[in-house]
Amino acid sequence: MSEGLTLYVARESGLHRLHPLTKLSLAGFLFVAGLALPGTITPYMIFILAVLPLAAWGRVARKLFGAAWRVVLPFAVSVFLVQGFFWPNGTPLLSIGPISLREEGVIFAAVSTGRILLVVSCFLLFALATRPDVLMAALTQRGFPGSIAYIVVATVQIVPRFQAKAAAILDAQRSRGLEIEGNLLQRLRALVPLIAPLILGSLVDVEERAMAIEVRAFNHPGPKTSMIVIGEAPWEPIARWILAIGAVAMIGLRIWLIL
């Protein structure tokens, strides 16, 4: 795969050798567990006790933590400020003039931050350890419609593709003398020359990819062959069923607790 167009990091690890559907089931199970199980620190415990050890097993812990930190930190700062200081009623922890930091708002912000951290880290764990082309081959070989398989793979690739395209546009505009650094006003003025080519380029990219998959008989109803051979251990199908049943059970538990 081309660098910059995917989050995948090639490593020789047990996590990378797992079948793509096993990794997808594992990420889905951790995602459901973090959202369904009650408790303020539950998402953080799942991140520390499950996601990070799996990332260390796959030798992608540093990349996962760095990417998750960059995504979650701005969200965490904003949600703690907004919910902590503007929570309508609750126990004051700290007063600054007419506003107070509310305990209930801080708890809500902590839970929200933990959940977004878990969602982002589960996606990154799967994306860093799974080649998109192998994932698509695995889905189609298991009988998934090609359109659904393509949507899943395109979702995994959308962030790095946008980053690569934005970086290329940024370099091109900088070479033309566009001032993109400086005070806030200068940066805001540089947004239009950056956003317009990004949107137009993305539309062109979508058209080119649609033409490419049609040339490769993407919608042909007949059987297709693949050069990618995907192996799996005998225990992996059983593990996937256990993870799927566990996720459904946790959803049922959550519904039961709410009722």
Image: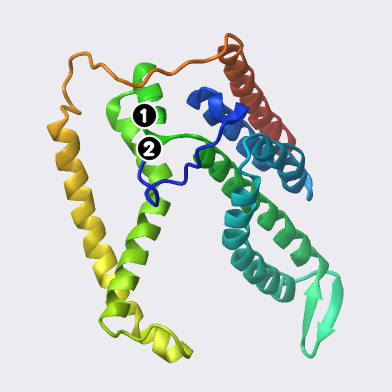
Residue 195 picture quarter = bottom left
Q: Is residue 14 left or right of residue 104?
A: left
* Crowd class of label 2 (few under 14; some 14 to 19; many from 20; radius 10 Å): many
Residue 87 picture quarter = bottom right
Q: Which mark is residue 153?
A: 2
In terms of depth relative to the viewer, which is nearer, 108 or 133? 133
Quadrant the C terminus occupies = top right
**Residue ranking furthest to the top:** 234
- Looking at the rendered structure, the number of numbered marks drawn on it comes to 2
Question: Residue at 62% of width from left, 31% of height from top?
Answer: 29
**In the image, what residue type sits under mark 1?**
Met
Quadrant the N terminus occupies = top left
- Give residue 10's position: percent from left, percent from top: 50, 38
Which residue matches tag 1? 136
Which structural element holds mark 1?
helix
**In the image, what residue type sits under mark 2?**
Val
Q: Is residue 143 visible?
A: no
Question: Residue at 36% of width from left, 53% of height from top?
Answer: 161
Question: Residue at 68% of width from left, 30% of height from top?
Answer: 250
Sequence-first disc among 1 and 2: 1
Q: CA distance from mark 1 to mark 2?
A: 6 Å
Question: Residue at 53% of width from left, 36% of height from top?
Answer: 129
In terms of depth relative to the viewer, which is nearer, 68 or 173? 173
In terms of depth relative to the viewer, which is nearer, 102 or 160? 160
- Give residue 158's position: percent from left, percent from top: 38, 50
Q: Is residue 121 left or right of residue 109?
A: left
The correct choice, above or below, for 184 with respect to 221 in the image is below
In terms of depth relative to the viewer, which is nearer, 178 or 158? 178
Q: Is residue 71 left or right of residue 256?
A: left
- The answer to whether the residues at label 1 and label 2 have Cβ atoms under 8 Å apart is yes
Specify the color scheme. Answer: rainbow
